[in-house]
Image (spheres, rainbow, N blue to C red):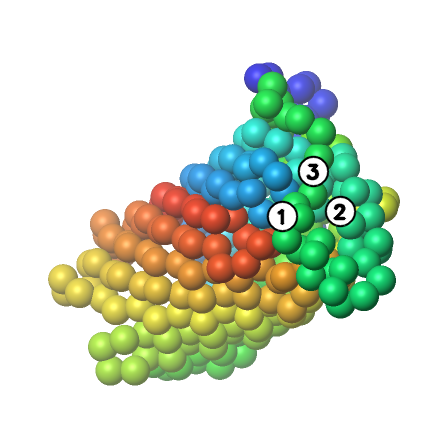
Amino acid sequence: MKVKVDDWKKLHESLIICLESCLIVLMGTGILQAQQVTYSGSLQFATGSYFFTESTESFYIVNGLTLSGDIGRISLNIPFVIQSTPWVSYIQQGGIPTGGSQHGEVDGRRSGASSMQEMAQQRRHRVDLPDTVSYRSSSFSDPTVGGTLFLYGRTSPSTSVNLNTTVKIPLANPESGFGTGAWDFGTGLSIFQRIRSFFWYGDVTYMWIGDMDELKLNNPFYFSTGISRPFGGGRWMVSTSFSTSTRIIDEYDPPMSLNFGFGHFISPRSSVSSSLGFGLSESSSDFSAGLGWSFQL
């Protein structure tokens, strides 16, 4: 399993494009006047059969940099993916079962249904794609640039409201299952509220997802909400969250998952975390587990 030279070349080009874009935006907004630079990374494992006959195992390694200032922040994330099949494509919100190089078969299953009864029967009969027992591939997936504007709560210890935007740059090969081959854009609002000793957050994001050659992807709303509680003098935290979206692929259930997290603040400048996730629909992985870390530079 080797990483191709072209992958490194594409990564280098994408970094230049993203960093130049970040600098332009930051200089235009004045956010560079009071900046903080944070490095963050994560390692996640996910497994599931989705609506296919065989399971897919995916490892996601994501490295990112965030520049924060008085009025907002901007971030750059570069994911590296290792997968046992090419059937799951990576977007900003995670893996979606597009079928990868066989995405026309996924579209064919739904387009062949002419009645509600036939669609229900198709849901019970999974998509049978070519055998990938010997398949395992790794590559960089599409980088993403994200921006956050602090709308309210910069001076409030209990409430904050943020405007968020994201852009996914299509550099990954969709034939390998590492991307959809199209640009994605997202925008939404997030709310953070302290309620006594608990913290609640909610997020609503609308995504413009580019279509694949033979598979139309809908533009969904993503919803997530969660609650967390610090303890141990604020150095430790436990959390639980729920996330879902509207339908991304016609006639397929949208992704839906329940997640649990545990975090430790090593210092005011660094933290580590872990998570467990359980899929609640056919478009989500059955199980996921992850580790994360963050260091202010």
Q: Residue, x 33% and y 48% (percent of image)? A: 274
Instruction: Please provide percent x and percent y for residue 79.
Output: 56, 39
Residue drawn where x is 27% and y is 61% of the image: 238
- Three-letter residue code for mark 3: Asp
Quadrant of the rendering where the N terminus is positioned: top right
Q: Circles 2 and 1: CB distance less than 8 Å?
A: no
| Residue 195 visible to an observer of this rendering | yes
Q: Residue at x 54, y 58 (%)?
A: 281
Q: Tag 1's secondary structure?
A: loop
The x, y position of residue 148, in whole percent, is 56, 65
| Residue 174 visible in the shown view | no
Work out whether 53 lies above or below 284. above
Tell me which residue sits at (52%, 72%) in the image. 203
Q: Position of residue 245 (x, y in %)?
A: 60, 66
User: Which quarter of the picture shows residue 207?
Assistant: bottom right
Residue placed under numbered mark 2 in the picture: 106
Q: Quadrant of the C terminus?
A: top left
Amino acid type at mark 2: Val
Q: Is residue 217 above or below residue 291?
A: below
The reply, left or right, for residue 276 in relation to residue 224 is left
At label 3, counting other C-alpha atoms closer than 10 Å, the crowd grade (few under 14, some 14-19, many 20 or more) is few
Residue picked out by circle 1: 51
Mark 3 vs mark 2: which is more N-terminal? 2
Front one among 50 and 189 = 50
- Badge 1, how many Cα within 10 Å: few under 14, some, many 20+? many
First of labels 2, 1 by sequence position:
1
Measure the C-alpha gap from mark 2 to mark 1.
9 Å
Disc 3/disc 2 C-alpha distance (Å): 9 Å
Residue 128 tag number: 3
Under circle 3, the secondary element is: loop
Marks 3,2: beta carbons within 8 A: no
